Image: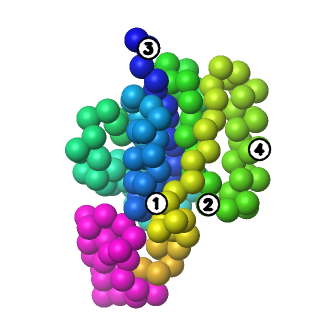
Amino acid sequence: MKKRKAIYPGSFDPVTFGHLDLIERALDLFDELIVVVASNPSKKTFFTVKERVGFLKTALKHRPQVQVKSWRGLTVGLAVKEKASTLIRGIRATSDFDYEFQMALTNRKLASKIDTVFLMPSESHFYLSSRLIKEIAGLGGDVTRYVPAPVAAQIKKMLSKKRMR
């Protein structure tokens, strides 16, 4: 029997419980999932690619059917290379949909055999975004209920170093 393989790309800066919720939902649909941390040198991130990959690997260590890797380049290129038939994209609001719909159609032009599946996180994580987490943390708020413990600890450590300077 052919295994269904998908790719879930993102910046994951930082990974949130919303991201992890989407990964669990994707695993209900696919046999294998590759979570891809986007590497974009022109984008300023809070965490390095290596740190983001590490956080995801730690959070997903109980899921042997999930691989975590970084990638620089077109995600459809990785999908073709990995023989994955589907890209997973998270949708929280109509504003997400407009952008994601354009990207899905562009990806279809680049690799016609790769489909995109849009998933919505559960209601308890619907409002979460990495940008929001960084804003809360930057203003001194507690992010422990939004991100895995190692991520929250590293954010706190990084911000305390910045405040000491």
Instruction: Say what amino acid the circle numbered 4 marks.
Output: Gln
Q: Name the residue under label 4.
A: 102
Q: Earlier in the sequence, mark 3 or mark 1?
A: 3
Q: Is residue 81 above or below residue 124?
A: above
Q: Which color scheme does this rendered protein use?
A: rainbow
Amino acid on which the number 2 mark rests in the picture: Arg
Residue 18 appears in the picture as rendered: yes
Instruction: State yes or no: residue 92 in magenta.
Output: no
Mark 2 burial class by Cα count in 10 Å: few <14, some 14-19, many 20+: some
**Which mark is first along the chain, 1 or 4?**
1
Q: Which element carries disc 2, helix, strand or loop?
A: loop
Question: Which residue is label 1 attached to?
Answer: 18
Say whether marks 1 and 2 touch (CB < 8 Å): yes
Give the foreground label among 2 and 4. 2
Magenta-span inclusion, residue 160: yes
In the picture, which quadrant includes the C terminus?
A: bottom left
* Residue 68 in the image, given as x and y percentages of width and height: 36, 39
Horizontal side of residue 126 vs 34, given as left or right: right
The amino acid type of the residue labelled 1 equals Gly
Mark 2, residue position = 92
Q: Mark 4 or mark 2, which is nearer the start of the sequence?
A: 2
Q: Which comes sooner in the sequence, label 1 or label 2?
A: 1
